Image (cartoon, helix red, strand yellow):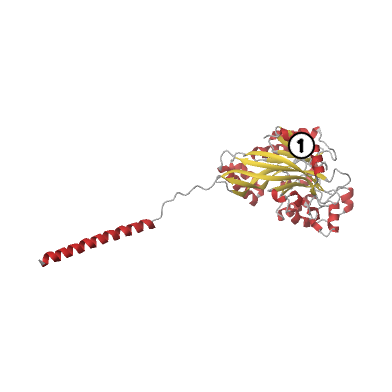
Amino acid sequence: MKKPIIFAIIGTAVIAAGTFAFFAYTSSSNKDSDNQPEYIETPPDPKIVKMDAKYLFVGTTFWGRNTNKSARASELGVNYPFSQLDTLNRDAYQAWIGGLECPVTDAGHNYNEEDKIFKFNCDPDYLPEAAKYFTAFLLGNNHAGNQGLEGLRTTRKYLEQNGIQYFGTPKRTANDPKDTEYANDEADINNCGVVILPVIATLDNNETKELKFPFGFCSAHGVYGVPGEDYQQNIKTYASVIPTIAMPHMGVEYQKSHDTLRQNLYRRLIDYGVESVIADHPHTVQDSEAYNGKLIVYSVGNFMFDQTFNAEVPRSAAIEGNVTITTEKVEDLEKWNSLAESCLQDKSSCFDLILESGLTKPTTKWSYSYHATTSAGNRITRLADDGDQASIGQRLNWSTTLSGLAK
């Protein structure tokens, strides 16, 4: 009887041990399974679906001559002419672009020359304050070369040091024999340039971030004439590749409306494919029009200038441009941003890089408004009152212009 009992006990123990081992193995296997990393599909990186921006295009800008006298006599010093620009709500814009009608050098001031022969100079110590507002300056005008070729080179150097981009040349045309002084400066043969502007990118997950985009900006300097065929062809080339804004500096001074010569030229620039034409030089606001659905402003007037001899010359129309940029291939928007970043490192080869990229010119949709400004009484530029806003709107013929713009 003892052997069967012993066998039974041993059998029971074996079964118990087997059962324990089974559950221990099962439990261990489950734990190991829990510790295994689960495969989670990584979502694709968000893609840019569009870019938006709000820019302010302003007129003749200048802190020399009498503006400089007022500034130096003020406790504000070099901040003087900029001290009320916040009335224009700078933070609402990605960029400001204006026409700098003055070389920036260390030449100082000969007020007899400035008053009698209009040979200007703007001191460089104003630039740090200017850089808080301006992203880029047009140099294609009849005073940017007042200190000669070396003065123009110095101007570009000071702008670069202060992080302000520039475009255009005071040279009237690449083929003009009167402008031989500029013949040895390749940068001044070109009336167009690439300007890198901030944009707000919207991603397909509805997030937004600030990126950059390369725009073409072209001058058409001729004052009372028209730029040569070489410069016009250059504008056409830029406009065929990237969104391009023309900012001519020409027209009859102190006239309240445009002439036929300017109308024919500016409409031709639209036909070449530019986004808009926003001109200055006449020192007063002139009319505007919609041509083939695009904006032409014949003169935006003096944004920051020292003239005060009548009620017209201290006023200007600052043009607000709102743009949306899209492409057929959404991945191309990221490539445009990459090109813009590369261009910031080397502006001299920027347009060639864009050509080599083979990217198709993006689609742009623009809307516009204007803001009347004044520097009357004290040569400090600021937002004008409602009366000037209405008056400038009438001068621009703004309601009619808006009705003709592409929706």
Residue projecting furthest to the left: 1
Please state the horizontal and vertical placement of residue 280, each as a whole percent of the image: 79, 42
Is residue 305 found left or right of 337 in the rendered image? right
In this view, 20 is above or below 395: below
Q: Amino acid at mark 1?
A: Trp
Please state the horizontal and vertical placement of residue 32, each as a whole percent of the image: 35, 58
Label 1 Cα crowd, 10 Å radius (few <14 / some 14-19 / many 20+): some
Compare residues 226 and 137 and report the one nearer the observer.
Answer: 137
Q: Quadrant of residue 288?
A: top right
Quadrant in which the C terminus appears: top right
Please state the horizontal and vertical placement of residue 209, each as a whole percent of the image: 60, 49
In this view, 21 is above or below 335: below
Residue, disc 1 = 398
Q: Residue at x 32, y 59 (%)?
A: 27
Compare residues 390 and 133 and report the one nearer the observer.
Answer: 390
Q: Quadrant of residue 317?
A: top right
Per the image, label 1 sits on a secondary structure element best described as: helix
Q: Residue at x 32, y 57 (%)?
A: 29
Quadrant in which the N terminus appears: bottom left
In this view, 73 is above or below 291: below
Compare residues 92 and 51 and report the one nearer the observer.
Answer: 92
Please state the horizontal and vertical placement of residue 124, each as a whole percent of the image: 78, 56
Mark yes or no: residue 191 visible.
no
Q: Number of numbered discs present?
A: 1
Mark yes or no: residue 344 visible.
yes
Q: Residue at x 30, y 57 (%)?
A: 26
Is residue 63 found left or right of 361 in the rendered image? right
Is residue 6 found left or right of 147 in the rendered image? left
